[in-house]
Structures are given as structure tokens and as C-alpha cells.
Amino acid sequence: MVYFYGNVANVSVSARHFDDAIRYCQRAFDISEPVAKSSRYHGNLYYVWAIALWQMGNLDSALKTINQSVEVDEKAALGGHVSLQVNLALVRYTKGMILGRQDAEASLLRSQAAVAAVQEALETPEKFAKTDASDFLSRQKIAEFELEVGNITRHRNPRQALIAYDHGLARIRETKASTASEIYEAQLLADSSYALRWVGRKNEAQQRIDRALQLLSEAQRFPAEKVEPMSDVYDALRAQADAYAESNQKMKAVRAYRELLDKLIAWRLDVQNDLRDAICISRTWTALADLLRRVGRTDEAVQLEAQRTELWNHWKGKLPNAQFLLRQSLVQVAPPAVSRSAAER
């Protein structure tokens, strides 16, 4: 029954039913206490619980809980079994996301600690990739982990970020072409376009965006009438919109962000109850409002900003740290110099 409740908790997290996930984790722990063998599931239960807490905005508790998962899984992985080592790497990676994920869900903004945690996680798939030239899972994890290292570091050190992005690209390109590999490659290409642009390689940045959209099309992910918040397609379309904005193609940027906003709304966001959705639409409103002001459409910008204020006020009534969480969506739409300025205010 411990395994059953753990699986149900996992499914609940995937369905974004986080209160249910926590309840099922607690039930699994309650059942496991009298059964010594059940303790081997504790690492996964802590892991699922931590993700639920993180997605709900309870970051301090999420970090405490993921540390408990790390502790349990480190002991389990000492035996050397491959699956247990992979589990530990995933838990360490998730710890990094809670500490400092950028351009996605809110985090504690502890960037150095986040990068250190993800780089520690990277050691495991790198070890397996070096010993098995055909191992897809290890290369998938390297792509996934390096994507986040790049996203965390690009705002302050875009050249360093490119090293991470390009390593992830090199590894995923070692695999046989598949829908999964196309999606990971597209994510790395789209997100790395920011760093390329910020070091002056604008043409290459646009080429990467174009290729990302092509790969998503080949994977039958794009075009799409609706777009999930913070998904691969969302990131690619936002990368294109931001590329227009940063190259002074203001009207193209407005149209791109307006289209992206329409596709988000078509997803039927739950901005009143799902923090991810609230942050994502807040980021999109912020970027679009800034562009509308730049083209003289101030009334429309004011309307979007009023919607954002109303949404933030709602979340301030739900979470004591809502201001800290939601303000991250203001910082993450800007180039490095602007990001630092906004963060320091």
C-alpha cells in the first residue's frame, strides 16, 4: 500500500493536484512506519512531496523536504545500483531547481547553490554517457540538466551559459533521432538564443530559434492552437518574441506576444489557484505591456498591468511570500543589465 499511495501521489503531482499529492504522501508515510521494509520508498515520497510544496510556493519547506530525499537516496545509492544513482541525480537536480530555477517556476533565487546542486547531479549521467555510447537516458538527463544550468547563469554570465547549453546539445545529438531528442534539442536551441544574442551573435541566435521551431514542428508539437505554460513550445515562441523585441522589431514583437498570450489563454489557465499559471501569464503580460508602451499604445499596457495587479493582490491573500514569488516574473523577461537593475530595486 505504501507503493500504491506513492504512485497516486506521483500521478497527482503530474495532474497538478498538489494538495492531493501531499495527502497521499502523508498517508504512505503513516502506513510505512510499522513496516521496516517500507523505508526504501521514503526517498521518493520526500521527492514527490517536495515538488508539490515547490509548485505551491512553499519554497522553504520544499527545500527542507528535498534535502530529506537527498539524504535517504544518498544512503541507498551507496550500493552502486544504476537506478538508485539515477534517482539520486534527479533529486539533486530538483534541489537545484528549488534553489534557483530561472525563467520558469519561482525559486529561492540562490543561483550559486542551484548551479552547484545541478552540476553535482550531472556527474552521474556524464559517467554513464562516457561508458555507454548508446545510452539515451544519460544523454537526456545531461540535456535536461545543462538546460537549467544555462538558464540560471545566462542573466549574469551568458558566455558561461553557452558552455552549458552547447554541452547539452552535443550530448543529445549523440542519440538516435526521436521525438524526445527533438524536443530536448529544441529547448536548448531556443533558450540558448538569449545568451548568443547577449554576446553579440545575433544571426546565430535567430538560426537557433528557427531550428527550434522546425524541430518542434517535426515532433508535432507546433504549430499549436493552445500552449501549456512554461512548456517547450511556450519557451520557443517567447524566445522568438523576445528576439524581435531586443532587435527593435517592436510591432513584430507585439504581434508575437499577443499570439502567445492568446495561446496561453486557450490552454484554460487556472491563474487563481496554480502558481505556475499565475507566474507565466504575469510574465507574458509584463513583456507585452512593456512593448505596447514602446509603440505608444499606453492604454492597452495599462489594462494589462491592471490585470497583473489584480492577480497579484489575489495571490498576496493566498501566500505570505507571494510578492517575492511573483516579482521574479518581472526580472526574467529582460536582458542581463536590465535584469540586474530590476533585481536590485
Image: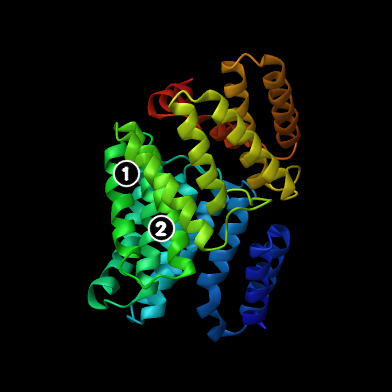
Q: How is the image coloured?
A: rainbow
Task: Give the side of residue 156 with respect to residue 271, left or right.
Answer: left
Task: Give the side of residue 279 with respect to residue 73, left or right.
Answer: right
Q: Quadrant of the N terminus?
A: bottom right
Residue wearing tag 1? 161
Asked which quadrant contains residue 106, the reply is top right
* Closer to the camera in the image, 121 or 166: 166
* Closer to the camera in the image, 271 or 197: 197
187 to 25, vertically: above or below: above
**Residue at image location 44% in from the left, 27% down from the top:** 246
275 to 91, vertically: above or below: above
Expressed as whole percent of the image width and height from the top left, the position of residue 93 reads: 42, 58
Kindly identify which numbered label has been placed on residue 211. none
Expressed as whole percent of the image width and height from the top left, the position of residue 325 reads: 59, 37
The residue tagged with tag 1: helix, strand or loop? helix
325 to 140, vertically: above or below: above
Amino acid type of disc 2? Glu
Residue wearing tag 2? 185
Task: Give the side of residue 78 with respect to residue 239, left or right.
Answer: left
* Closer to the camera in the image, 84 or 305: 305
Amino acid type of disc 1? Ala
Expressed as whole percent of the image width and height from the top left, the position of residue 182 reads: 44, 62
The answer to whether one can see residue 70 in this image is: no
Question: Mark 1 or mark 2, which is nearer the start of the sequence?
Answer: 1
The answer to whether one can see residue 39 in this image is: yes
**Residue at image location 43% in from the left, 21% down from the top:** 341
**Residue at image location 49% in from the left, 33% down from the top:** 242
The residue tagged with tag 2: helix, strand or loop? helix
C-alpha gap between disc 2 and disc 1: 16 Å
